[in-house]
Image (cartoon, grey):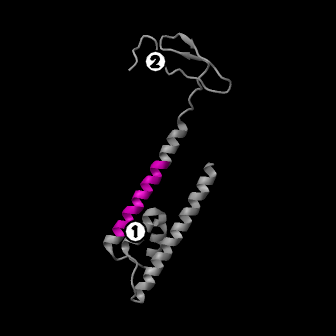
Amino acid sequence: MIFSVFIIAIAYLGFINLKTYRAFAADKRFAINKEQRTPEATLLHLARIGGWGGAKLAQKRLRHKSYKQPFGHQLNVIGALQAASVTTFVLVLGLLSLVPPAAPVTKHAVLETGAAQELPHVAGQLVMSLRPPAGRPAR
């Protein structure tokens, strides 16, 4: 399951980065030929949805949109936010892997008083009492 999600994510990132690079290349060609240009909002949107690497590669390799400071700054902010998001995701996953799994609930639920309460048990199912502990009023 995790492997297939990983493969789909890699395929998506490859596709969107290639599409972004091609959009930058087409816009460069339009600029040279003095044709109607691709809006900057479209190029930034492609970078925002995962094509930041393709956008930066095109910006460096094609020397396109490298002197427009508002655009370059916005592109760098998108990259920083994506890097922060990925780092946070990896750190949270790493921390969650350190948490030990919860112990399964058994046939006997131990109350706060230390007494055990017999619960009906069905083979292969976890059982848990939803009643509040004795001596405590229900809220």
Question: Is the residue marked by circle 1 packed among few (<14), some (14-19), or many (20+) residues within 10 Å?
Answer: some
Q: Is residue 18 left or right of residue 80?
A: right
Secondary element at image label 1: helix
Q: Is residue 18 left or right of residue 122?
A: left
Q: Amino acid at mark 2?
A: Pro
Query: In the image as oriented, which residue stretches furthest toward the left?
Result: 70
**Residue at 40% over, 71% down:** 42
97 and 119: which is toward the camera:
119
138 and 61: which is toward the camera:
138
Secondary element at image label 2: loop
Q: Main secondary structure of the magenta part?
A: helix
Task: Give coordinates of residue 130: x percent, y percent.
Answer: 50, 22
Return the residue at label 1. Answer: 44
**Residue at 48% over, 18% down:** 131
Question: Is the residue marked by circle 2 packed among few (<14), some (14-19), or many (20+) residues within 10 Å?
Answer: few
74 in magenta: yes
Compared with residue 92, is residue 6 higher up or lower down, i.e. above or below?
Answer: below
Residues rendered magenta in the picture: 72-89
Compared with residue 96, is residue 7 higher up or lower down, i.e. above or below?
Answer: below
Which quadrant holds the C terminus? top left
Task: Give coordinates of residue 137: x percent, y percent.
Answer: 39, 15
Res 104 quadrant in image: top right
Residues at discs 1 and 2 in contact (Cβ within 8 Å): no
**Residue at 43% over, 75% down:** 59
Q: Amino acid at mark 1?
A: Leu
- Which label sits on residue 132? 2
